[in-house]
Amino acid sequence: MAIVRLKRKDIKTLGIWQLLGIIAQIPLGGITVLTHLNPIPVAGHFLLSIALIAAGTTLFERRRINTVTSGAIEMKSFLLARIHIILSALVIIVGTVVTGSGPNAGDISAPRFNISIDRVAWLHAGLVIALMVVTFALFFSCDNPLVRKRVKIFVVVAMAQGAIGFAQYYQGLPELLVGLHLLGVTLVWIGAWRIHLAAQMGHS
């Protein structure tokens, strides 16, 4: 049985970016220590991880050469999917500001953002609400079965994440719930990115 080796430049490129991103985490991690957990490099460290997760998810999705799309996607739904991933990224970025403004940004001597945690937390919540509005709009306007399936998964994960977020805020940010919230961020981002990838496949 002959084995045909096909060169996948997209897979190779994603793999290289993953490697470079992991290497970049090393000096960035060192900077966070040298700056005594300054919230800016700490946020950068986390956001680079989020970018690596997106690249890894894309790599996983493209692992099969013959990617089968499950129906086309209209321009309106495609644009909503774009807005969805942008809002998801904004929610995460503002979330790092919330963390950098609160008591869990590091130890007691670690610097914080000079921002009211209540204000930035409500901004974060407002963006989450906007994201959920777009999520439901995408679900009801899209006929692509793959996108709709992934939106359903996203809603379940996002709702659980929102419940944890409200619980940690009103209980004074206990470390355990903050840790669960960070895990939830990862799952929400993977879900949002998979919607983005499905919309791209359906629109190609």
Image (cartoon, rainbow, N blue to C red):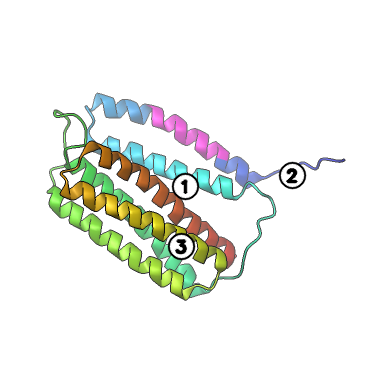
**Is residue 28 in the magenta section?**
no
Report x, y in % for residue 90. 32, 55
Percent x, y of residue 116? 12, 49
Along the line of sight, the residue nearer the viewer: 71 or 156: 156
Q: Magenta: predominant secondary structure element? A: helix
Give the foreground label among 3 and 1: 3
**Residue 54: which disc?**
1
User: Does the residue at mark 2 contact the one at mark 3 (Cβ under 8 Å)?
Assistant: no
Mark 2 neighbour density, 10 Å: few (under 14) some (14–19) many (20 or more): few
Residue 198 vs 182, above or below: the answer is below
Residue drawn at x 26%, y 42% is 177
Query: At label 1, which amino acid type do we have?
Result: Ala
How far separated are the C-alphas under marks 3 and 1? 17 Å
Residue 60 appearing in the image: yes
Q: Which residues are magenta?
A: 15-26
In the rendered view, does 139 fall on the left or right side of 4?
left
Q: Residue at x 39, y 54 (%)?
A: 157
Helix, strand or loop at disc 2?
A: loop
Q: Residue at x 27, y 48 (%)?
A: 95
User: Reading the chain from its start, which is encountered first: label 3 or label 1?
Assistant: 1
Foreground of the two, 18 or 158: 158
Disc on the earlier residue, 2 or 3 = 2
Q: CA distance from mark 2 to mark 1?
A: 24 Å
Q: Position of residue 64 (x, y in %)?
A: 66, 49
N-terminal of the two: label 2 or label 1?
Answer: 2
The mark lying in front, picked from 2 and 3, is: 3
Quadrant in the picture for the N terminus: top right
Determine which of the numbered discs, if any, sits on residue 6 in the image.
2
Query: In what element is the residue under mark 1?
Result: helix
